[in-house]
Image (cartoon, rainbow, N blue to C red):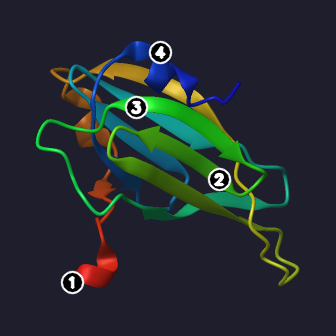
Amino acid sequence: MSELDLLKQSGYSLISIYINQDGTALRFETDLYFYIYRTRGECCAAIYFEDIEYPSVKPEHGYGVKDIRSINEYGYRIVTDVGDIVISGRYDDGSGWGGYAVDCYLYAVIPKDFDDYKASVEWSEFKENKEAE
């Protein structure tokens, strides 16, 4: 079971995915809630989200989440009704290896009308289909 399974179990459409400034948190926007996930790090290592790949088509009313799978230690695959969203992460222990690994946990579930949290953290929306720009 993935930490992200709560997104699937909620039954809400996934509207957008946002990342905080240092890449250690993702905010999933659904119909009614924001699901905030943070990376799990060790004492001497940084783990952060690095990239996201969206399906070529963005649905008008959000993605219907069908399944969520861990991709070994490299990230997550969110299976939607129009294709897969792939989230990859990176592990940096300062040794220069910089391999790929990501692990996260549910940090908060916040109603969309609760604005205090949005103001306290700076978020950027992941660009969709970067290669099309």
- The residue lying toward the viewer, choosing from 132 and 6, is 132
Q: CA distance from mark 3 to mark 4?
A: 9 Å
Instruction: In the rendered structure, find residue 133 and report the number of the disc placed on it.
Output: 1
Q: Secondary structure at mark 2?
A: strand
Which callout, 1 or 4, points at the residue further toward the start of the chain?
Answer: 4
Residue 26 image offset from top left, x and y in percent: 45, 46
Circle 3 sits on which residue?
65
Q: Does 129 sit above or below residue 17? A: below
Q: Earlier in the sequence, mark 2 or mark 3?
A: 3
Give the image location of residue 84, x and y in percent: 45, 50
Residue occupied by mark 2: 75
Residue type of the residue flagged with mark 2: Gly
Outermost residue on the front side: it is 82
Q: What is the spatial separation of the Cα atoms under label 2 and label 4, in whole angstroms?
A: 19 Å
Question: Which residue occupies 74% across, 67% down?
Answer: 100
Secondary structure under the numbered disc 1 in the rendered image: loop
- Of circles 1 and 3, the one toward us is 3
Q: Amino acid at mark 1?
A: Glu
Between disc 2 and disc 3, the foreground one is: 3
Report the side of 93 relative to 30 (left or right): right
Q: What residue is at 50 percent from the left and 42 percent from the top?
A: 78
Q: Image quadrant of residue 47?
A: bottom right
Count of marks overlaid on the render:
4
Identify which residue, 131 or 95, lies in the foreground.
Answer: 131
Can you identify the residue that label 4 sits on?
9
